[in-house]
């Protein structure tokens, strides 16, 4: 293993997440890339490679987006890793810069989604008929995860509701969030049941949107960026063996392993983190990811939210953007939008949701089917 | 730009290309990866990252393949760049090794296709109804390309037929080829018309299959491989601007540019090449790619095939494997299978289709929608 080159985020951009009725994914992507390039201080012409993360947008979607800006001839690579597609695109942009093959790389995440539950099952090769089950696939899986966690550790439905309350509170402070309205524990519990005991407000929405980040070498970063954000860990892990046999394990092992690798690469411990953007696709996921990321002991996730430790101003702010639950979850865009939030916070530009003195932030994204990305950024 | 690490191919494997009725893409992929790992001399456990190129295989297809072998936890990344998906996966494996982030990387290409013409149109975001047109999209495009080339340079239908004859001859020497039967110029001209003047034998078949290559750093390569194959250029280019407005340009500029970059990176001229695996999706494409790759002057491609310069034993053997026309074209697998053929030739293991004394080979793959990969390997 040779010494790796340093890599920095020098620019970020995103669209608001939401319905975006009538807007194509190309237009959304263009908006995010244009904003990131403008933010970076480098010319579009200096970007030497582009990675586009998405799940459902068809053949050469990245090229269709960048065709609107003006393709420059450089490599454009579409990447897919289920819900971790954007996180994977960012990982690859970092790898490209670290490789010395390029000095400036674009990570783009895009997704245009319809209303209603996602009907993609990564485990069945797309062979099963879509929309066949009465209870949507992913909520049903996470309902089972909750039951297993509750049985083992006493986690409660109310604690899940508190996750939703916190993230909707944060989302209400974020102009890019899909949902901008605060909710109470009573609201969350009274919402429509999706997969017992998960109510609609404990499930992330299907959203449309795009996010982009420009990654650059140290020389470029120091010459153009007011405040370059160092990438101190870029980690991507997949399953082991044939993958986990029980649902709870599917939300633990691979995540905890990716987090350990990231902390090791960054040479930090979890208590050094000021903020985290994590993959709260369902409220129970956030509780378990507190444990996976080492914020608390295994089984203590429910108490961690109950004690307010993950709110803005708490021990570590988790998903100050509103997370997937309130900001929304346009699959391929999510991982890059997490980078957008961490960079915005580390620059001190997060306005009403700013975490005072934030210096180190982590992004965490899980794609079912076998990919977890954990990246650590520092100012 | 820092000095790049050397990268080598140390193992290759592939399935035969063909119909493979009743076999899933996971099984095909497993077969190719298992063969490549066995061929490499390294353990599966030492592979540190995997890139899976495919177009139509659904969410986290690479993970589904590798789950059959036993996932090791390392990053698995699915990449898509239309027909250049496999070539892109290989490019990324090279980048990963050059980056110093890993010492051993897997490039995998897979595709399971049905019979009949491909109905994917990269330019329309998947919005148009499939199977709507009387003449299939890609053959119609290449028929137009032929007419433009014929008008400008006098290229003939018979010259296209000669490409098919050569590639079917080569394919008949390759046990992995979809078609193993020789054809005559008369056979090609008399075959069913697909898009006038392109007959069925001037169009590549839709095939199923998989191919894999193991890429490693110099230290690893020298310690395990009898004959490590050096990667002296790995190039990926996309379109410029909004992409070409006329069909002939779509088959020229981006390809010629990628070739120039590859020759520059390898510090060689085209006359140094012993063999080429090129993207002969249609017979006219091969003729124009002779020109794009600098084997002859612009407009001379028709005469190049007519003079027998691209046959095994000619000036430079083009597609000794049979190419897409005879070996077949499982979209994502093609680019990696090209690497398989070049490596097999450079090792002197190509049996009846061996090019005597082959030392330098090039792979060329074009994905419509905007990606061309050109890689140069040397022994």
Image (spheres, coloured by chain):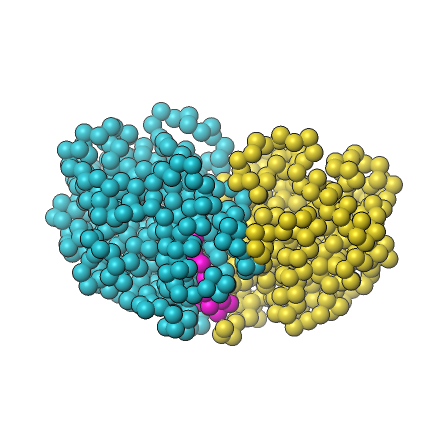
Chain colours: A yellow, B cyan
Q: Residue B266, percent across and down?
A: 31, 65
| Quadrant of res B237 | bottom left
| Quadrant of res A11 | bottom right
Q: Is residue B45 visible?
A: yes
Q: Is residue B366 above or below residue B346?
A: above
Q: Is residue A94 above or below residue A200?
A: below
Q: Which residues are magenta?
A: B96-110
Q: How many marks?
A: 0
Q: Is residue B197 rendered to the left or right of residue B5?
A: left
Which residue occupies 31% across, 62% down?
A: B377
Q: Is residue B159 above or below residue A49?
A: above
Q: Is residue B270 rendered to the left or right of residue B102?
A: left
Residue B42 magenta: no
Which residue occupies 44% across, 70% down?
A: B1
Q: Is residue B121 visible?
A: no
Q: Is residue A175 rendered to the left or right of residue B333?
A: right
| Residue placed most toward the observer, B25 or A4 | B25
Which residue occupies 45% across, 41% down?
A: B24
Q: Residue B379, percent across and down?
A: 28, 67
Looking at the image, which residue sits at the far left? B307
| Residue placed most toward the observer, B117 or A288 | A288
Which residue occupies 31% across, 34% down?
A: B139
| Quadrant of res B341 | bottom left
| Residue placed most toward the observer, A284 or B162 | A284
Q: Residue A42, percent across and down?
A: 53, 61
Residue B101 magenta: yes
Q: Residue A159, percent across and down?
A: 83, 49
């Amino acid at each position: 293993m040779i010494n790796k080159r340093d890599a920095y985020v020098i620019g970020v951009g995103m669209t608001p997440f939401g319905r975006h009725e009538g807007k194509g994914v190309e237009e959304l992507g263009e908006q995010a890339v244009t904003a990131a390039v403008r933010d970076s201080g480098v010319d579009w012409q200096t970007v030497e490679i582009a990675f586009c993360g998405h799940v459902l947008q068809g053949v050469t979607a990245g090229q269709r987006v960048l065709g609107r800006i003006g393709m420059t001839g450089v490599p454009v690579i579409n990447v897919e890793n289920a819900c971790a597609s954007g996180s994977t695109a960012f990982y690859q942009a970092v790898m490209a810069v670290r490789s010395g093959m390029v000095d400036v790389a674009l990570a783009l995440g895009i997704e245009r989604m319809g209303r209603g539950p996602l009907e993609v099952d990564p485990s069945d090769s797309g062979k099963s008929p879509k929309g066949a089950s009465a209870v949507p696939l992913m909520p049903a899986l996470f309902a089972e995860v909750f039951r297993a966690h509750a049985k083992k550790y006493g986690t409660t439905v109310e604690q899940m509701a508190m996750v939703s309350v916190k993230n909707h509170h944060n989302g209400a402070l974020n102009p890019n969030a899909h949902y901008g309205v605060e909710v109470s524990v009573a609201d969350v519990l009274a919402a429509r049941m999706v997969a017992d005991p998960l109510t609609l407000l404990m499930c992330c929405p299907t959203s449309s949107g795009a996010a982009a980040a420009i990654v650059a070498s140290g020389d470029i970063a120091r010459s153009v960026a007011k405040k370059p954000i160092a990438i101190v860990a870029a980690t991507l892990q997949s399953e082991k063996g044939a993958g986990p046999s029980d649902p709870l394990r599917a939300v633990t092992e691979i995540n905890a392993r990716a987090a350990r690798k990231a902390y090791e690469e960054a040479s930090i411990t979890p208590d050094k983190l000021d903020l985290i953007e994590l993959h709260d696709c369902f409220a129970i996921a956030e509780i378990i990811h507190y444990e996976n990321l080492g914020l608390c002991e295994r089984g203590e996730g429910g108490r961690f939210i109950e004690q307010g430790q993950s709110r803005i101003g708490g021990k570590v702010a988790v998903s100050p953007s509103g997370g997937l639950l309130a900001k929304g979850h346009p699959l391929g865009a999510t991982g890059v939008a997490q980078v957008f939030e961490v960079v915005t916070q580390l620059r001190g530009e997060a306005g009403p949701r700013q975490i005072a003195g934030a210096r180190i932030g982590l992004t965490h994204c899980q794609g079912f089917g076998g990919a977890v990305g954990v990246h650590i950024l520092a100012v």
